[in-house]
Amino acid sequence: MRLRALQHIPSLMGIVWHSGPPVICGILTFRLMAALIPLAMLTVSKKILDAVQSHYAGAPLAPHFWWLVWAEFALAAFGAIAGRTIGYFDSLLADRFTRHVSLMVLEHASRLDLASYEDPLFLDKLERARVQATDRIAMIQAIGSVAEQMITAVSLALGIFWFSPWLLAVLVITVVPAFLGESHFAFLGYSQNIGQTPIRRRLDYLRVLGASKESAKELRLFGLGGFLSDEYSRLSNQIYDQDVRLARRRLWAGALLSLLSTAGYYGAYAYVIYRTVTGALTWGTLQFLAGAIAGTSSNIQNVFSTFSSIADQSLFLTNLVEFLKVAPKIRSKPDALPAPRPIRDGFAFERVTFAYPGGRRPVLERLDFRLEQGERIALIGQNGEGKTTLVKLLTRLYDPTEGRILLDGVDLRDYSIEDLHSQIGVIFQDFMRYEMTARENIAVGDIKLAQNGAVYQAARKSMADEVIEKLPKGYEQLLGLRFEGGVDLSGGEWQKIALARAYFRDAQLVILDEPTASLDARSEYEVFQRFAELTAGKTALLISHRFSTVRMADRIVVLENGKIAEQGSHSQLLTLGGRYAAMFELQASSYR
C-alpha cells in the first residue's frame, strides 16, 4: 500500500510546480550545489593533509597549498549560504503551496453536489483533504532533502567504492533493516490516523460547541459544561492511548535497529583506522574515508528515513487525490441550454419521486405539480413533508430519483446549472450569516453585480436599510462577532439582511423558505406587503407555517406524505374543510 501511495507523488509534483516555478528552480539549483559540497570539501581536505604529511617527512609545501586552504574556507562559506538560501526558498514554497492547495480544495468543494455534504464519509474525506493536504509541505521539503541526500551519498559512496566495494556494501546492508522498520511503523501510523478521523471530527465539534455564541446560553442554563468536558476527555484520552502504544512500539524497534546501523558504521571506521596505522593509507586518505564513511552512513540512513517519511506522507496525500477525484453528479451537460429569458410556461413536476441517499422512504412520491409563470404559490405542511426538498429539486441542488422536472417544457437537466441559478433568488430557513460587512452580506446575492446602488435598493425592499442605518459604520460595518470590530444582529435583523440578499438578485423565480420566522408581527406584515409588490410579474414560491402570510398566495399547496393533499386559494380550501382548514383553525384558535 505504501508503494501504491507513492504513485501520487508525480501528481503532487505537478501541483508544487504550478504553485511557484521560479521558487522551485531556485530550490533545485541550490540543493544540487549543496549536495556536492561534502565531497568537494573532503577532496580538498585530503590534499591538505597529504601535503602536511609530506612536509613533516621533509618535502617542501606545494606552491598551491594555501590556495587549498582558502578553497576549503570558500566551500564551507558557500555551504552555509546555500543552506540558508534553501531555507528561504522552502519558506516561500510553503506559503505558495499552502495557498495553492487551499484554493484547489476550496474551488473543488464549491463544485460538488449538496448530497456530498450530507454524507459522513465524504465529510471525513473533506476534513482530511482540507487539514492534511496543506500539511504536506513537509513532504515536499522531504523530497528535496532526499534528493540532496542521495546525491551526497552517491558522490561519497563512489569514494568508498574506489577504496573497497565490500566496505560500501556493509554500510548499505546494515541500514536496510532500519528503513524497513521505519516504513512499517509509518504505515501503522497512517492506518491509525485514518481510523481516528471520526473521533477527531467529534472533538472539533465539541470544541466549537463548548465555545460558541450560539450554544453559550443552553450550556449554562442546562449545566452542560461538565458533560462536554468529560466527553472531550474520554475521546481525547482514547486517541492519546492509541498514539502512546504505537509510539512505544516504534521506540523499542527503532532503538534495536539503530544499533545495527551504528555497528556497521563503526566497523567500517575501525577497519580504515587499522589500514592507516599499518601504513597502508595516508593521513589524507584516512580523513577522506572517515568523512566519506560518516557522510555516506548518515546520508544513507537519512535517505531511508526520509523516504519512509515520504511514504508515510504520500499515504496522507491519497486523501487529497481521492478528494480531487470526487466528481459532481449534478452538473451541466457540454451542450447545456441557457435558462429561458423570459420564462413563459413555468415549472412542471411530472411524477417526481425523490429519496435522499440512504433514506428508508421517499420524501416525495410520484408528485405532479405545476408552478406557472407569474404565479405565487404557498407550500404548507408539517415538518418533514418535503417542502424544502421540493425547493432543492426546483433549484436543481438535487435531481429526482424518478420522474422529471420541466422548465418551459424542457428538462431541467438540459439547462446550464450556473445560468439556471442566476435566474433564481432564494433564501432558506437556515440562511447564512456571513461574517462580512453589511454591504457584502447583501452583495453575495449576485456577486457579479455588486453595485452599491443595487445594494441600497435591495436593502430598502427588505427593510434592512433601517437596520443598517443604525450601525456605526453603516453598510461598511462588519457583522458578527468572529472578527474584531464586528457587531452582532438579532435574529430578525439578520433575516432582513438575508431577504435583501434574495431581492438583490433580479431573478425570475423568487423562493422564500420561512422568510419571516424571526420577525415580529408588525415587521412580518410590512415584509409581506412589500413582497406582494416586489414579486408582481415574477414567479414566487413561499414556504411558511404562518397562515396569515400564505393567504396572499394565488394558490396554496398542502403537502402530506410526499404528495399533494390539497390545493387552491385560501377561501377555497377553507370551504373544502379538509386538512388546510383544520390547520388554519388550530392556529387561529391560539389567538382567540
Image (spheres, helix red, strand yellow):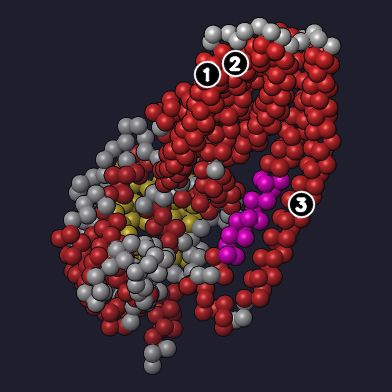
Above or below, 589 relative to 138: below
Q: On the image, numbered disc 3 is attached to which residue?
A: 244
Q: Earlier in the sequence, mark 1 or mark 2?
A: 2
Name which residue type carries label 3. Answer: Val
- Judged left or right of residue 206, residue 513 is left
Q: What residue lies at 58% left-to-right and 29% top-to-bottom? A: 145
Q: Residues within 10 Å of mark 3 (few under 14, many from 20)?
A: few
User: Which residue is at the front of the view, 123 or 339?
Assistant: 123
Specify the segment rendered in magenta.
191-207
Q: What residue lies at 34% left-to-right and 47% top-to-bottom? A: 406
Name which residue type carries label 1. Answer: Ala
Above or below, 48 relative to 346: above
Q: Earlier in the sequence, mark 1 or mark 3?
A: 1
Q: On the image, numbered disc 2 is attached to which residue?
A: 44
Q: Residues within 10 Å of mark 1 (few under 14, many from 20)?
A: some
The x, y position of residue 586, in whole percent, is 44, 83
Q: Nearer the viewer, mark 1 or mark 3?
A: 1
